[in-house]
Image (cartoon, rainbow, N blue to C red):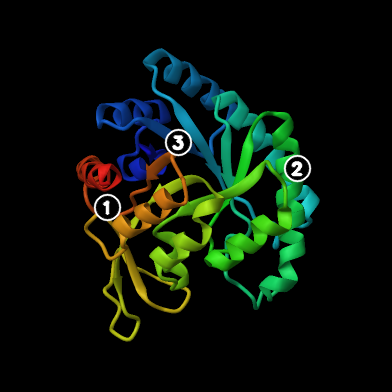
Amino acid sequence: MQISVSSYSFSKMKTAPVERLRLARELGFAAIEFTETDMDTAIRLRRESEKLDFPIVCYTVGAEFLQARSVEEEAERLYKQVDIAQALGVHLMRHDASRGFQPYRAAHSSFNEALPLLAKGCRLVTEYAAEKSVITMVENHGYFCQDSERVAALVGAVSHPNFGALVDIGNFACADEDPAAAVGNVAALALHVHAKDFHIKPGTGDSPGEGWFQSRGGNYLRGAIIGHGNVPVRQCIGNLRRAGYDGYVSIEFEGMEDCAQALRIGRENLEKLINEK
């Protein structure tokens, strides 16, 4: 496994995308992935990536099939994001299935009821992406499709060789699922991995205040430096290794600490765990 970093990790720095690419290289990462951008920026990033011989390995965008006006319309919007992924020169693109846990607003409050629509949307996108040599993935993200069983069910329902999962080892905590057990459930589906850590406090106590948010079940979470939080990162990496995963593990940092320092420490901690035998 090699360690990359998400451009999202630099959000607090307010730097331009090209600067994030350069900073990731300076911090010792093997590659970078980028969040949603425009075509002109994608072309500039690819040129800079090739100039520095520093790869861009994944493109990450949002999606919402359940609350869009139609699955087909949302898929059409994502086709343009696939074109941007192709311009970036990446072969992996992650998109959400549904971003919110809002059963009282959604027309499809049950996951089992929503699954055929989610699968239809993901299949439309991946069929288009396959023609562009871009593989698409769904991430355990957005509360509604965040549990490992739901991710596995969606990948199975799409049933397309060009579609799999981006496994974020920390995000399972947002659905109150044990990260190690959850990673074990979906490790065989992983096409890309996010390394994320959280400080976690039970929802039975008072709110810790600024910087924290609540899980689906009401527990409190705050982004942490890899190795400083409550996510069993070592066990998650071990589960991925046993499943045969040997791709990039991209740090996605969203804590309150200084970004550069947090990413340096997190990369060093993650490197030790990946190199363990």
| Residue name at image x 27 percent, y 42 percent | 275
| Residue name at image x 74 percent, y 46 percent | 75
Nearer-N-terminus badge (2/1):
2
| Residue name at image x 59 percent, y 27 percent | 39
Quarter of image, res 82: top right
Give the class, few, some or many, for how many residues have Cα within 10 Å of label 1's Cα (few <14, many ≥20): many
Residue positioned most to the bottom: 204
Quarter of image, res 93: top right
Q: Secondary structure at mark 2?
A: helix
Q: Position of residue 100 (x, y in %)?
A: 57, 65
Q: Is residue 270 above or below residue 171?
A: above
Q: Which residue is mark 3?
A: 33
2 vs 3, front mark: 3
Q: Amino acid at mark 2?
A: Glu
The tag on residue 76 is 2
Observer able to see residue 232: yes
Distance from Cα at disc 2 to Cα at disc 1: 37 Å
Q: Position of residue 86 (x, y in %)?
A: 62, 27
Residue positioned most to the top: 51
Distance from Cα at disc 2 to Cα at disc 3: 23 Å
